[in-house]
Amino acid sequence: MALIHGFASSFDHGWRRTGWVDILADSDRPVVEIDLLGHGSAPRPTDPEAYGNVEGLVLEALPEGTVDAVGFSAGAMVLVRLALAHPDRFHRVALMGIGDKSFEAGGPSTIAGALRGEGGPEDVRGELFRRLAVSAGNDPEALVAFISRSQTPLELAELEGLRLPTLVVLGERDFTAPADRLVATLPDARFVGLPGVDHFATPADFRAIDAVVRFLDGD
């Protein structure tokens, strides 16, 4: 079982503190601990060029054989890329905190400024990422390098090739919402919406955990 955390978080902050690890262990699903490069216990280079193999490092960390996997936000985007490139490594995938707007072009400059303490009070999203980074004990410059890395944009239409059973969980107030086109594009998808929940609250919402466990059980 693999859990891939979101940007500015870590395995401990995103999955252990929110109860995911214990709940999955109680259902006989041991979890492999994965920190994205630049986050948590992983190395923290500050050169964007060092982040050219983020997906490859996650792939190397996966258990042997076929696994179930859950990704949140940036971790969900990493999981999508891996599942498209290596479908034989996955059984079921759950994508949380990504919606139609996750596949729109956008630069990292605003969030980078906020991480460096340069954001203004009007940049609510950037400030929330900065606070998340601080609470997770991450290095802002490593995070800036992570979001500044060079990667080929992922088009929503490419997800027609993701034929694995897929669950999409998205908060009603998530800034990437809605997920109508995303769910319609995925060949074998189901959707669970979380009323009143924003992006950052999703991993800690028990309804998200419950939906994922039920999905993994085949319900």
Image (cartoon, grey):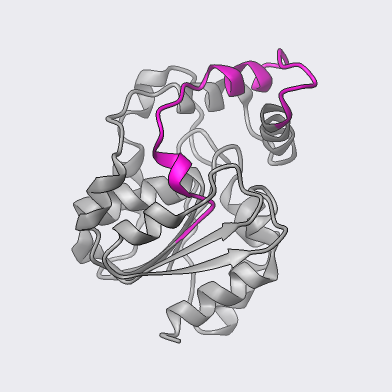
Residue at left offset 47%, top offset 21%: 107
The image quarter in which residue 86 lies:
bottom left
- Image quadrant occupied by the C terminus: bottom left
Residue 157 position in % (x across, y down): 25, 47
Residue 206 position in % (x across, y down): 68, 70
Residue 94 in sight from this viewpoint: yes
Residue at left offset 63%, top offset 58%: 203
In the image, residue 82 sits, relative to residue 164, either above or below, namely above
Q: Nearer the viewer, residue 118 or 159?
A: 159
In the image, residue 164 sits, relative to residue 3, either above or below, namely below
The image quarter in which residue 185 lies:
bottom left
In the image, the segment drawn in magenta is 95-124
Residue 36 in sight from this viewpoint: no
Residue 89 position in % (x across, y down): 24, 64
Residue at left offset 23%, top offset 65%: 163
Q: Is residue 100 magenta?
A: yes
Q: Nearer the viewer, residue 135 or 198?
A: 198
Residue 129 position in % (x across, y down): 66, 34
